[in-house]
């Protein structure tokens, strides 16, 4: 779900080219979920190999990372660890939503409504341990580093950004802002042309960047206060939020009273929320010690062998993508050589 503070933040359009030579900490689960939701067959089901193993996430990682590396972008994927106990309610809510979507998918498919079937199938998306293992192995072949978080991946990504290890965080969710990420990029792994659900209309999805400090300054609040705003609206750790409080009302309350404990209207509800622990999750996140980020050479033959021989990808298409990457890297290298002559 993530926290719904989109309407409060300063969002500026950008483009992928502007992140050339930049290290970007990508919320791995968030990106892979996007690939699993979007990359599907006509009936809405995942792409699979001949053994029935899902390959949609590998398809997304192949084409997106070829694109990143061709542009000189340095992606680092951050994988979630064990979720905090306060996230249990949100996890159960998501499971229930997926069960309901599965029922709707089967009904739509039975009557031949493929448009609805595809929509509901996307809502059933879930991450399996094998997909995480697949993704990490694939990233190793690409020479792209990844980080294993202790708990929330966005917390570790935000930490990497705050400490200068990464230049920005890439995620569709806004939780990184509550964790203190200085720059958040949205639509980083899913930019491009997309069809609107249930409509024969396409839109261009462009990356946008959100500056933590610029947003706080515009709202005239502190980092601690935006966390309290998040708690009022609802986070993954208190998904229901407070009754009839949206982003604008939450902002107004915090600006008037300063903090949750001083808002008279919510005191009864506040007793039912472990708000101090939620604040601690965002302010004192349990993050690993991340050392130097190192990129290695892409194992082209290893990628071809893995995708074509083990996962039944078209060898011709895989080679075409990798050749595009090779040519881009050779061109960039030649340009740099010319620059220093």
Image (cartoon, rainbow, N blue to C red):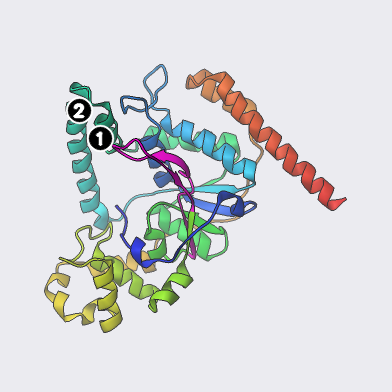
Quick check: 167 left or right of 226?
right
- Name above or below for residue 144 compared with residue 245: above
Tell whether label 1 touches label 2 (CB within 8 Å): yes
**Among the 4 quarters of the image, the one containing residue 127:** top left
Residue positioned 23% across, 60% down in the render: 238
Q: Magenta residues? A: 182-207
Residue 134 seen in this snapshot: no
Q: Residue 159 in the image: state x and y as whole percent.
A: 48, 62
Residue 136 seen in this snapshot: yes
Residue positioned 22% across, 57% down in the render: 239
Q: Earlier in the sequence, mark 2 or mark 1?
A: 2
Q: Which mark is residue 108?
A: 2
**Among the 4 quarters of the image, the one containing residue 279:** bottom left
Dot 2: what SS? helix
- Name above or below for residue 20 compared with residue 272: above
Instruction: Assess whether residue 254 is covered by the magenta stretch.
Output: no
Q: Which mark is residue 120?
A: 1
Front in this rendered view, residue 228 or 70: 70
Residue positioned 64% across, 32% down in the render: 324
């Amino acid at each position: 779900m993530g926290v719904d503070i989109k309407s409060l933040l300063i969002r500026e359009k950008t483009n992928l080219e502007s992140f050339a030579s930049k290290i970007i900490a990508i919320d791995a689960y968030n990106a892979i979920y996007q690939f699993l939701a979007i990359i599907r067959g006509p009936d809405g089901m995942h792409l699979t190999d001949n053994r029935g193993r899902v390959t949609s996430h590998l398809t997304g990682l192949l084409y997106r990372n070829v694109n990143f590396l061709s542009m000189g972008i340095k992606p680092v994927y951050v994988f979630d660890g064990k979720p905090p106990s306060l996230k249990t309610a949100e996890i159960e809510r998501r499971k229930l939503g997926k069960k309901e979507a599965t029922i709707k998918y089967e009904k739509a498919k039975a009557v031949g409504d493929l448009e609805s079937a595809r929509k509901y199938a996307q809502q059933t998306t879930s991450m399996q341990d094998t997909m995480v293992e697949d993704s990490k192995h694939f990233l190793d072949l690409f020479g792209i580093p990844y980080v294993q978080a202790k708990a929330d991946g966005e917390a570790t990504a935000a930490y990497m950004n705050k400490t200068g290890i990464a230049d920005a965080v890439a995620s569709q969710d806004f939780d990184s802002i509550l964790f203190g990420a200085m720059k958040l990029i949205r639509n980083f792994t899913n930019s491009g042309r997309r069809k609107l659900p249930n409509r024969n209309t396409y839109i261009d999805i462009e990356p946008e960047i959100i500056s933590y400090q610029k947003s706080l300054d515009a709202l005239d609040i502190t980092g601690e206060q935006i966390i309290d705003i998040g708690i009022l609206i609802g986070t993954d750790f208190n998904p229901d939020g407070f009754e009839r409080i949206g982003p604008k009302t939450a902002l107004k309350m915090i600006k008037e009273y300063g903090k949750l404990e001083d808002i008279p209207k919510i005191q009864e509800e506040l007793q039912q929320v472990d708000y101090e622990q939620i604040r601690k999750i965002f302010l004192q996140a349990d993050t690993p010690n991340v050392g130097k980020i190192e990129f290695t050479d892409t194992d082209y033959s290893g990628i071809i062998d893995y995708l074509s021989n083990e996962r039944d990808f078209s060898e011709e298409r895989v080679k075409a993508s990798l050749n595009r990457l090779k040519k881009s890297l050779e061109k960039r290298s030649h340009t740099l050589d010319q620059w220093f002559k």
